Amino acid sequence: MIIGIPKESMPGENRVAILPAEIKRLSSDDLFFILESCAGSGSHISDDDYRNVGAEISADVYSDSDLIIRINPPNEQELVKIKSNSTIISLLTPFTNHTLVKNLAKNKTSAFCLELIPRSTYAQSMDVLSSQATVAGYRAVLNAATHIGKFFPMLMTPAGTIKPSTILIIGTGVAGLQAIATANRLGAKVEAFDVRPAAREQVESLGAKFLYMDLDDSAETDSGYAVEMNEDFIRKEMELLHDAAKR
């Protein structure tokens, strides 16, 4: 089987779908990898790094590949290059990207949608949503620290004391919890809010203050996900967050 790894075409996307170490681990007489030139450049991985583990570098990874692995959905120009009766593994946003789904079916291309893999214990190693949410939460705080225009931690200097910044995190899923942990490590005073009652314990375990309002179990599903709330709840929530943001 020939596995093709294209260079991501989405503007600002620097990730690559597979690393040299994984190619070295997976390559065999039955599996051969072809990468588009400069596919890993955004992640500081050179073409030679891939060549050194047995991969081939090509300007066209679509015409011969039995399986295409990428991060973002292919655009229209890339879609027409995919070989008929091949397979693609990628984030695909199938519920909104109807044209892509129809074109894949028309081309007889089998598709494995990464964001629809069940988030279960057995599938943790394939859970791209949680892993990338962790990165997003971490990076969001670093970006905030760069643009806020003041220090995160309390600083005591001969010229005086600078109070720590107060950081408000809204939503404490995977990204939110990572944001709390990162802001804490940078020395900020952290407050957080989530509609799910169970989130309070998680927030406080990371050293942050949980913004409390009258919550009940109806705010989350049996699986632990937040549900859409009524207008009265949203009004009270906005008042709480407005007061917190002013601090």
Image (cartoon, rainbow, N blue to C red):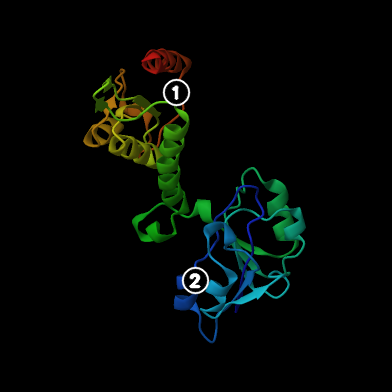
Q: How many marks?
A: 2
Q: What distance separates the C-alpha of mark 2 from that of mark 1? A: 46 Å
Vertical position of residue 50 compared to residue 156: above or below: below
Disc 2 crowd rating (10 Å Cα; few below 14, some 14-19, many 20+) is: many
Q: Amino acid at mark 1?
A: Met
Is 148 left, or right, of 37 in this rendering? left
Tell me: 67 left or right of 132: right
Where residue 217 sits, quadrant-wise, is top left
The mark found on residue 229 in the picture is 1
Identity, as a three-letter code, of the amino acid under mark 2:
Pro
Give the mark, 2 or 1, whose residue is nearer the N terminus: 2
Give the labeled residue for mark 2: 20
Q: Quadrant of residue 124?
A: bottom left
Q: Nearer the viewer, mark 2 or mark 1?
A: 2
At horizontal 53% and vertical 58% (from top left) the residue drawn is 43
Q: Residue at x 64, y 74 (%)?
A: 57
Q: Please tell me which residue is depicted at 37% across the width and 26% down the height of the picture.
A: 168
Image quadrant occupied by the N terminus: bottom right
Front residue (pair 147, 116): 147
Residue 29 position (above or below residue 241): below
Q: Dot 1, crowdedness within 10 Å: few (<14), some or many (≥20)?
A: few
Percent position of residue 87, x then y: 63, 67
| Residue 239 x, y percent position in the rendering | 41, 12
From the top left corner, tell me how far across and down residue 26 is, in percent. Answer: 47, 77
Residue nearer the viewer, 87 or 142: 142
